[in-house]
Image (tube, rainbow, N blue to C red):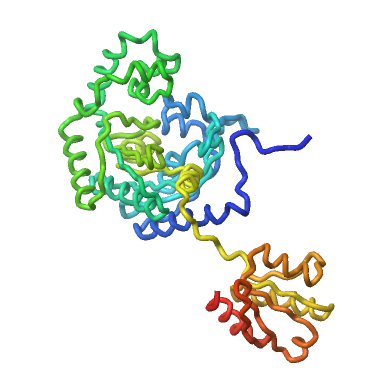
Amino acid sequence: MEIQAPKGTKDMLPSQAYKWHYVENIFREISKNFGIKEIRTPVFEHTELFLRGVGETTDIVQKEMYTFKDKGDRSITLKPEGTAPAVRAFIESRLFNEAQPTKLYYITPCFRYEKAQKGRYRQFHQYGVEMFGSKEPSMDAEVMALAMGVLKKVGLKSLKLNINNLGCPECRPKYNEALKAFLKENYDSLCETCKTRFEKNPMRILDCKEKSCKEITKNAPIILDYTCDSCNDHFSKVKEYLDVLEIPYSVDPGIVRGLDYYTKTIFEILNDDYTVCGGGRYDKLIEEIGGPEMPAVGFGMGIERLIATIEDENIEVPREDDIELYISARGEEGKMYAFKLAHKLREIGVNAEINHAGRSFKAEMKFANKIGALFNLVIGDDELGTKEAKIKRMKDREEFNIKLDNLEEIKQIIKSQK
């Protein structure tokens, strides 16, 4: 029986690699522009991290985590998101003792057991940014500006930024009581999951995807009517900073986000009503996981979903030059020379390939075209005798004279005449 990839996973094949490299290079370039350093955390963590960090009432914890016991009988979970592990690493490495703010980014695999669909997989990859140590509204705006900058650089045109204010531990209880009073009349019609959320975290009910629950909550009270003066002032400043950057936005009281740790500002970025990024402020998470009291803000962006959006928008992604020079050889001595020459050229940065399949000379030319080689070099007795040859540019058959022992000359011609 043929063994296939597990449901909800997808291979990245060589034909798609250039799209991944394209977006990942943009992630790294713009992160560098903002002074953000890379962090890499383990694929799995102790389950407690996500129970405390992501929240026991979230869909992720209740329905979607890949959790198992290891050989030491410890509960281990494949990470379902990148923020909690980054916070754990920040605390464990005592980065809070360094000059603040600390700005981190990651490109990491994540795992959630959910219904597989286009752009959404059980193993997916996430680009995320976390900024620790600043309570200033300017940091909220900077995170949103960074995310918008990445998506614009990728080529998306129909971007919409929606923002909301979730309040803080001081004002949110008032809203929770008002929400519970509203939901109480329809408690029996809530799904079983939302019934468990009713006491612990009623705001989670607003994020439920069940049709019956969405119908119940469509006229629910909104958090913006209950936020305190401090949260309102913070939110107003965030909007001012976005205005300074001339980034359009809409206030959407319906945004809740699917994670428990958010406070104050949250946001989503949509492209033609398709969510491509989400994030916000989480000022209590570092303390809840065992670190000092320290504010933070960040976002996550699914890479598979982003690439699917790029494809739907027919955005042209520049292809990479896989093979710059294909070296054809005649005779055993020619083959040995071509083998050595290809190795030497690779050492100085030329993408070179030779005949490893015993193809005929005619078949070699077809192969060189098939793999998209930019140039071809033929080495036979004459070329070995004179140590001179011609490099042919494949697209227009133009030839360039070269000396076989002048590697830098060969490189210069290839790099400058593409």
Q: Is residue 165 positioned above or below 42 on the image?
A: above
Q: Quadrant of residue 84?
A: top left
- For residue 234, say whether it is visible: yes
Q: Residue at x 37, y 40 (%)?
A: 270
Please provide percent x and percent y for residue 229: 15, 33
Query: Quarter holding the N terminus?
Result: top right
| Depth order, front residue of 309/348 | 309
Please provide percent x and percent y for residue 374: 61, 71
Q: Quadrant of residue 349?
A: bottom right
| Depth order, front residue of 328/245 | 328
- For residue 45, say whether it is visible: no
Q: Residue at x 35, y 17 (%)?
A: 215
Q: Residue at x 39, y 18 (%)?
A: 197
Please provide percent x and percent y for residue 299: 38, 43
Tell whether 202 sits left or right of 225. right
Please provide percent x and percent y for residue 112: 53, 33
Total labels: the figure holds 0
| Depth order, front residue of 56/235 | 235
Tell whether 50 sits left or right of 76. left
